[in-house]
Amino acid sequence: MSQVKIYGLRSHLGPLIPAMSDVIHACVMDALRYPKDKRAHRFFQLERDEFFYPTGRTEKYTIIEFSMFEGRSIMAKKTLIRLLFVRFEAELGIAPADLEITIFETPRHNWGFRGLPGDEHNLDYKVEV
């Protein structure tokens, strides 16, 4: 299981949402072997007076937060991060300096979906990659 929250300025993020979602999902599929039909992305478009970011960043500054089950290897998570930096720059024109990524992991029993705790589901994909 993985859910993704993306934060950015409305003026920049808004027009990129479909393409950005596609890039993020492609990276997740490649790095974490995630199924094509499993996409849970939430975009938070903020006004300039609601989104403060560090000096040296531009209006393209974007934050991505992943909430996911524990179990992915360090290598898989590093691959995901590297793919995001490369593809955001190549496909969306967002430089690595304007992208920050955080991965939050929790045990499966801390999730609830489709009427059961996460550790009681038989998933159609592998978490331990």
Image: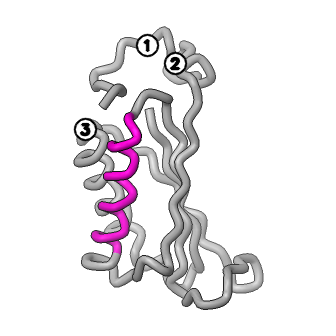
Residue 73 location (% of width, % of height):
38, 35
Q: Which quadrant would the N terminus be assigned to in this image? A: top left
Numbered mark located on residue 118 in the image: 2
Q: Quadrant of residue 18?
A: bottom left
| Magenta highlight range | 73-88
Q: Is residue 114 left or right of residue 111?
A: left
Disc 2 packing (10 Å; few <14; some 14–19; many ≥20): some
Note whether 45 is above or below 80 in the view shown.
Answer: below
Q: Residue furthest right?
A: 49
Magenta run includes residue 129: no
Disc 3 packing (10 Å; few <14; some 14–19; many ≥20): some
Note whether 33 is above or below 85 in the view shown.
Answer: above
* Residue at mark 1 to residue at mark 3: CA–CA distance: 18 Å
Residue 26 location (% of width, % of height):
26, 54
- Circle 3 SS class: loop
Magenta run includes residue 83: yes
Foreground of the two, 45 or 70: 70
Q: Amino acid at mark 3?
A: Arg
Circles 1 and 3: CB atoms closer than 8 Å: no
Which residue position is annotated with label 1? Answer: 121
Q: Is residue 101 left or right of residue 80?
A: right
Residue name at image x 32 percent, y 78 percent: 89
Which residue position is annotated with label 3? Answer: 33
- Circle 2 SS class: helix
